[in-house]
Image (tube, helix red, strand yellow):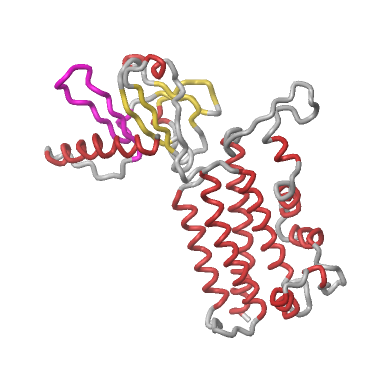
Amino acid sequence: MATNLRKNIDDIYVRHELTRREAVGQAFSEPVWAAQVILANQAGQEPTVRLNREVRLRVQTLESDEWRDYLEIPIDGPSQIRQVDLYPEERDARHLTYFQTGVSADQLVWFSVGDPELRAVSRPGHERAANYPYSEEAWAELMNEHDRVSGLVLGGINSPEPDMPIEVIMATALQRSRHLLEAYIPMLIQRNLAAGSALIRMQLDSVMRVNAIFLVPDPLVLWDVLRTDRPWSSIVDRDGHQLRDVYLHQKLSERFAWASDVYARMSGYVHLSRPHLEATASNTESFLGMQIVQGSAGANVSDERLHENGTLFMQVTSALLAICEGYAANRSAG
């Protein structure tokens, strides 16, 4: 609903206002990131349309209970708006408003068109933009990075029958990563951490195995593991350790200190375990007073948990890209 309302505000009011301003020699050239329509109280009156820094709101952020002018809050953070209201002189105005929350490109859509129940709520009902917790451009850039890094890894060796095992393993991992990214973004929009976290675990699996390339004396054996679909634990590294998951994430932690912690946390989402119980029951320590919840995936997901999950996916994916790009750079230097 919020997405459609935002579009309607643009189609009905903002475009008309932009055309009107241009006609009187006051063209508005910057992109519109906030708009406020104060609806007329009498028939025949024109609404007042405010754009960007003309919008009049007072807000509270997560950091303070102090009411501040919306325009004092940096659009690029770190503050995040948690409460919003009109100024006292316009408190009862009928209005349609959308604006950025102060983090990434999220937007709140708030309206009050005469319903006393709506007017009584100072914190707006809102729908997170589909690109939460990062801008759509950030996810698109991450996808483009796969193209760039794949190009560096494959270089001029791409052929119907490649014979360089490291490049083939990396290309396979990058392709898997691209597919996981395509699947993760819709889950993030749905606030589905149960499924999204399992994808983070799968993404980490790729990073662990690409890192294993540098643990074995001959990467050709890992190519053979992929080709024959044998378990990675059938291979030992140059120190005689089997390439089991526990060893692989420990070795990856030597390069990225967070690897083992993320592995342990995200593995809990692969098996039926405590994270799924916490999403279902209000009291996980005792049956006494327990409430069982059945419903949509995002019903009990806070913005903070969602933001952390998106950060983890980007972090793990960036690690994969960094290892592959570093290899390509060293190969070229050699």
So how many labels did they put on this image?
A: 0
In terms of image quadrants, where is residue 221? bottom right
Name the one closer to the observer, 186 or 79.
186
Asked if residue 38 lies in the magenta stretch, the reply is yes
Percent across and percent down for residue 284 are: 76, 31
Q: Is residue 177 above or below residue 269?
A: below
Q: Residue at x 32, y 39 (%)?
A: 7
Q: Relative to residue 93, is residue 43 drawn left or right?
A: left
Range covered by the magenta-colored residues: 33-55
Q: Relative to residue 162, is residue 87 drawn left or right?
A: left
Q: Residue at x 48, y 24 (%)?
A: 83
Q: Relative to residue 21, is residue 114 drawn left or right?
A: right
In terms of image quadrants, where is residue 75? top left
In terms of image quadrants, where is residue 29? top left
Which quadrant holds the N terminus?
A: top left
Which quadrant holds the C terminus?
A: bottom right
Percent across and percent down for residue 5 are: 34, 34
Q: Is residue 104 above or below residue 179?
A: above
Asked if residue 113 lies in the magenta stretch, the reply is no
Q: Is residue 217 above or below residue 81?
A: below
Q: Residue at x 30, y 31 (%)?
A: 54
Judged from this view, the residue extending furthest toward the left is: 24
Name the one closer to the observer, 328 or 158.
158
Percent across and percent down for residue 109 are: 39, 32
Q: Residue at x 50, y 21 (%)?
A: 66
Name the one closer to the observer, 255 or 34.
34
